[in-house]
Image (tube, rainbow, N blue to C red):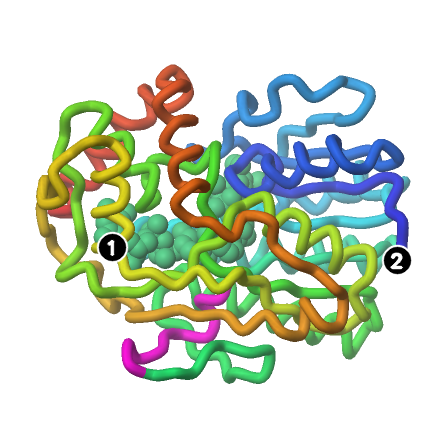
């Protein structure tokens, strides 16, 4: 078992990265965290509020900045790489920042890892595998061929391939995880679940793309964090692990559940323009992670996890109000 003492978490001020930082601080007193984050529109220092200053340092910077990496990487024993441009709709409107951060940024980190010989864990997505038909009993496994659909998922797939090449050619000590759709606190209001919750809280009707039959495989972000820690400390070098918690649901069912939990009529939403190239279904088979590393999710009741998430957005309007208006402006321009 590898016990990291000093880790860099890139993108640690974003949704999943900040949840991971809280999880490490709460569960592993022996580990110090350095967050490296550019604080783009998606990064927010408030996500890290309350963390004791002796447990975490914050560095505002860009993963594409090789000189900065040369300054901060020495002295750390691992990098856990979450930083990315993460939203499919944004990638369709303007793909360039996705190529820069997701592909070039990962390349810079890999070069730093090679130079300083430290452990690297790469956070990726199930979207690299493309989509499944709605009536296909199959799920994605570590052997599924790459088949990304969007600018976002193709840049994530590219970054995964760089990691594999650097592992084989230069022998860096790397692992990769591909996780399904996360939900929980601190998720940006551009994403499906927080967008609909905050729409209802601001008196706006939720917006469903197309018929809403697309299936996503939902996992609570805390379970993603425990899985990443398990892979970082016990995973076999050079391996890929899929992370998922058997949470398949279609969008219209999730939306109706949100409406019910928020005391709204189940038909109080609008159908809007579908996403171009919209993936139909994602589904993860996490057998390898469960059997080889003994990981299990804790949040297996989606309805209670969703209820807690609704409560979090209801109780923290100051966290999202400012971004909400700008986000809805952007969607309006796209007809969504
Ligand atoms: P997010 O958009 O909420 O956060 C991204 C963070 O990265 C932000 O804090 C941002 O400031 C930072 N960042 C962006 N560009 C940067 C750069 N060039 N240099 C330094 N920092 C930069 O994203 P998220 O939803 O938390 O996703 C985090 C990671 O998890 C991503 O790699 C994403 O592909 C992956 N992932 C997400 C999901 C999901 O459901 N959201 C599922 C599987 C995998
Ligand atoms: O307003 C909306 N209405 C709607 O019907 C939005 C924002 C989305 N949707 C649909 C599109 C998807 O089928 O809901 C589903 C979920 O959408 P997103 O929250 O945008 O997530 P998705 O595109 O599935 O990608 C997410 O999971 C995988 C993350 O954003 C990625 O970073 C991750 O890799």
Report whether residue 262 is seen: yes
- Mark 1 or mark 2, which has the lower sequence index? 2
Q: Are marks 1 and 2 in contact (CB under 8 Å)?
A: no
The residue pinned by badge 2 equals 117
- How far apart marks 1 and 2 lie (CA) works out to 47 Å
Q: Residue at x 86, y 42 (%)?
A: 76
Rendered image: mark on residue 15 = none
Residue drawn 19% across the image and 59% down it: 212
Task: Name which residue lies at 28% across and 36% down.
Answer: 261
Q: Which residue is mark 1?
A: 253
Left or right position of 12 against 231: left
Q: Secondary structure at mark 1?
A: helix
Q: From the viewer's perspective, is residue 67 above or below residue 286?
A: above
Tag 2 secondary structure:
loop
Between 69 and 263, the one nearer to me in the picture? 263
Give x and y (percent) for residue 240.
67, 71
Give x and y (percent) for residue 329: 19, 33
- Residue at position x 43%, y 26% in the image: 312
Q: Residues within 10 Å of mark 2 (few under 14, many from 20)?
A: some
**In x, y percent, where is residue 206?**
17, 40
Residue 100, visible in the rendered structure: no
Q: Which residues are magenta?
A: 125-135
Residue 286 percent across, percent down from the top left: 59, 70
Q: Is residue 323 left or right of residue 58?
A: left
């Amino acid at each position: 078992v590898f016990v990291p003492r000093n880790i860099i978490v890139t993108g640690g001020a974003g949704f999943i990265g900040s949840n991971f930082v809280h999880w490490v601080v709460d569960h592993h007193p022996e580990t110090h965290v350095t967050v490296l984050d550019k604080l783009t529109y998606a990064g927010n220092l408030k996500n890290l509020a309350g963390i004791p200053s002796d447990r975490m340092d914050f560095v505002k910077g860009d993963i594409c900045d090789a000189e900065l990496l040369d300054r901060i990487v020495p002295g750390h024993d691992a990098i856990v790489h979450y930083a990315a441009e993460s939203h499919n709709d944004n990638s369709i409107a303007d793909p360039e920042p996705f190529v820069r951060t997701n592909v070039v940024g990962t390349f810079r980190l890999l070069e730093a890892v090679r130079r300083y010989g430290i452990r690297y864990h790469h956070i990726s997505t199930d979207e690299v595998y493309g989509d499944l038909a709605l009536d296909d009993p199959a799920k994605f496994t570590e052997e599924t061929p790459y088949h990304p659909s969007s600018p976002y998922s193709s840049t994530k797939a590219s970054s995964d391939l760089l990691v594999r090449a650097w592992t084989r050619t230069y022998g860096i000590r790397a692992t990769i995880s591909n996780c399904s759709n996360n939900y929980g606190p601190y998720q940006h209001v551009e994403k499906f679940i927080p967008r609909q919750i905050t729409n209802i809280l601001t008196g706006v009707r939720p917006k469903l793309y197309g018929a809403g039959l697309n299936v996503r495989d939902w996992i609570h972000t805390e379970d993603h964090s425990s899985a990443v820690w398990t892979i970082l400390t016990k995973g076999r070098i050079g391996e890929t692990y899929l992370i998922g918690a058997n949470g398949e649901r279609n969008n219209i069912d999730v939306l109706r559940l949100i409406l019910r939990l928020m005391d709204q009529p189940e038909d109080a939403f609008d159908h809007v323009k579908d996403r171009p190239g919209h993936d139909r279904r994602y589904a993860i088979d996490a057998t390898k992670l469960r059997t080889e590393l003994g990981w299990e999710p804790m949040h297996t009741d989606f309805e209670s996890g969703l209820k807690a998430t609704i409560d979090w957005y209801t109780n923290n309007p100051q966290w999202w109000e400012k971004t909400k208006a700008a986000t809805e402006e952007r969607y309006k321009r796209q007809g969504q």
